[in-house]
Amino acid sequence: MLALLLGVSVWACNDPDPEFGTNEFGRLQLVFDNVVGTEDLRLQTGIYNNAAGEQFSVSALNYFVSNIRLKRADGSEYVVPQDSSYFLIREAEPASQTVTLTNVPAGDYVGVSYLIGVDSLRSTRNISELKGVLEPSSDMNSGMSWDWNSGYIFFKMEGSSPQAPINQTTGERRFQYHIGLIRNLRTATVSFGPDVAQVSATSTPRLTIRADILRVFDGTQRVSIAQNNNVMVSPFSATIADNYVTMFRYSQQVKTN
C-alpha cells in the first residue's frame, strides 16, 4: 500500500555542499509499493500463486533499506549521510513505506541505489549507539534483530501455503524467510527511466518504487515453498537474497511543492 502523505524524514546539515557547489537544498521522497505481480500486496487476505504453481498468502513483509545513494544526471552521486540512512519498510505500517530525504543538494537525479540490509560497521556498533529502527528492543524494529546473534534480519517474509510441509506441533502449513548475515547483503540499483527527479527548494519529487515479491520465488533462481519453506542461515539463504534484490522496479513520479 502507498503512504503518500506520511513519511520518515532524514536530517542532514544545511551547509553548502562542497561537491555539488550549491547552497540550495530540497527534499526527495521514495515510496516503496509492495506488490504481487500486478496486484497490491494484501496481508493475510490475499491469495497468490508463484512461478512453481504454489498457492500462498503473506502474513508479514519487512526489509531494511540503507546506505542510499542518489545518482545525478551528470553521473555523479549524492550519498545520504550514513547516520541518516537506515529505514525499515514494513507492509503492516503504511507510514514506513515512504522515505523522505531532506537537505538533498538541488539538481537533477536519474536513479537511486541502496543496500537491502544493514552493513557490518553499523551491525557491530555498541547497542547504545543503535537508535530508531536499529534499536533491537524498539517497537520500530519489528523483531528484525536476531535473538541469538548480533546483527539484523535484512529481509523477512512469512506466510502460509497448502504446499508447505505440515508442522507436526501446530498443524499449520507455513513458510518463513528470515535472511541476514553479511554475506547476504545485496545492493539494489533503480533507474528512474525517462524521468528526471528535479530537486529544488520549491519542488519535492515523489518517486514510487514497486517491490514485486513474486521475484522472491522467481528471480535469478526458482524457489519452491514445498522444498524450501524455512530459510534462515542455511547456504540457500543466498539464493533468496539473490532473488529479492531483483524485485525493485521504478513505477512513477509525482512532483509536489
Image: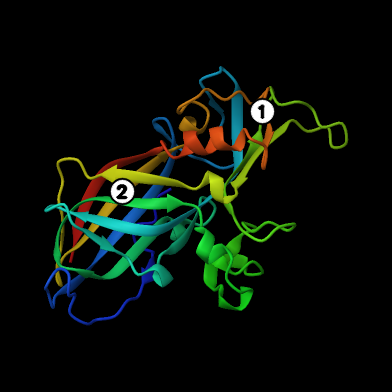
Residue 159 seen in render: yes
Q: Which mark is residue 86?
A: none
In the rendered structure, the answer to whether residue 39 lies left or right of residue 110 reads right
Residue drawn at x 41%, y 36% is: 246
Residue drawn at x 87%, y 31% is: 168
- Asked which secondary structure carries label 1, the reply is loop
Residue type at mark 1 is Asn
User: What colouring does the structure picture have?
Assistant: rainbow
Q: Which residue is mark 1?
A: 228
Q: Residue furthest right?
A: 169
Residue 151 found in image quarter: bottom right
Residue drawn at x 40%, y 65% is: 85
Please provide percent x and percent y for residue 216.
Answer: 51, 33
Q: Which residue is mark 2?
A: 208
In the rendered structure, the answer to whether residue 162 lies left or right of residue 49 reads right
**Where is 204 relative to 238, above or below?**
below
In the rendered structure, the answer to whether residue 113 lies left or right of residue 43 reads left
- Asked which secondary structure carries label 2, the reply is strand
In depth, the one of 24 and 180 nearer the eye is: 180
Residue 213 seen in render: no
In the rendered structure, the answer to whether residue 109 lies left or right of residue 40 reads left
Marks 1 and 2 sit apart, C-alpha to C-alpha, by: 31 Å
Choose mark 1 or mark 2, whichever is in front.
Answer: 1
**Where is 118 relative to 24, above or below?**
above
Classify mark 2: residues with Cα within 10 Å, few (<14), some (14-19) or many (20+).
Answer: many
Please provide percent x and percent y for residue 227.
Answer: 68, 23
